Amino acid sequence: MKTLVIYATHYGTTEACANLLSDALQGAVVLQNLAVNPSVDLTEFETVVVGSPIYAGRLNKRVKRFCNENESALLGKRLGLFTCDMEEGEGSLKQLEHCYAQALVAHALAKTSFGGQFLFSKMNWVTKKMIKIMSKSDEDVKRIQYDAIKAFANALNS
């Protein structure tokens, strides 16, 4: 089984999660960052995983465009959807379901949030200020959910 993990990242958290997922998946896995290579040929993959950070309640624009342009092809694949965000619990799943197209969410074999991070050293000045106000802190916050990544991979491996 050949799997494509396609994603976009802004500060590197989604890429880190995609790499962790890749290590946990069985078979051949290809990672593709849409910012580096936006051209995708889905024909050689049985399984496709799509991952995106969530900013201001929205998917990364490259991921959104990819999903819109390839929805019918994705509906013909074994599909997984993940987000990276700082929302917790039920709110995180609702956010995922709101951001991805309903048909994709309904079709996905695995869908979840892998958590997220606030890494102030990687943020520009404006983003630092906004996050500091929202989180009431200027300390890095690391909430990657390693168990969620493992469970997601297990669902796709079965």
Image (spheres, rainbow, N blue to C red):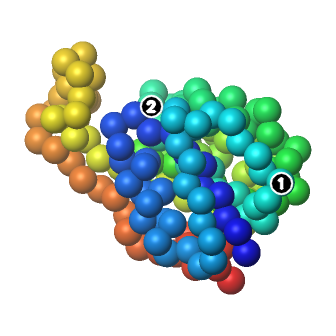
Q: Earlier in the sequence, mark 2 or mark 1?
A: 1
Tag 2 residue: 55
Secondary structure beneath dot 1 equals: loop
Q: Is residue 86 visible?
A: no
The numbered disc on residue 43 is 1
Q: Determine whether, in the image, residue 157 is placed left or right of residue 140.
A: right
Identify the image quadrant of residue 155.
Answer: bottom right
Residue beneath the point at 42% across and 65% down: 20
Residue placed farthest to the top in the image?
126
Q: Residue at x 59, y 59 (%)?
A: 30
Front of the two marks 2 and 1: 1
Q: Residue at x 38, y 54 (%)?
A: 16
In the image, residue 74 lies at what x, y percent?
A: 80, 50
Above or below 10: residue 87: below
Q: Position of residue 120 (x, y in %)?
A: 18, 35
Location of the N terminus by quadrant is bottom right
Please, what secondary structure does the residue beneath circle 2 have?
strand
Callouts 2 and 1 close, C-beta under 8 Å:
no
**On the rendered structure, is 95 left or right of 139?**
right
**Amino acid type, label 1:** Thr
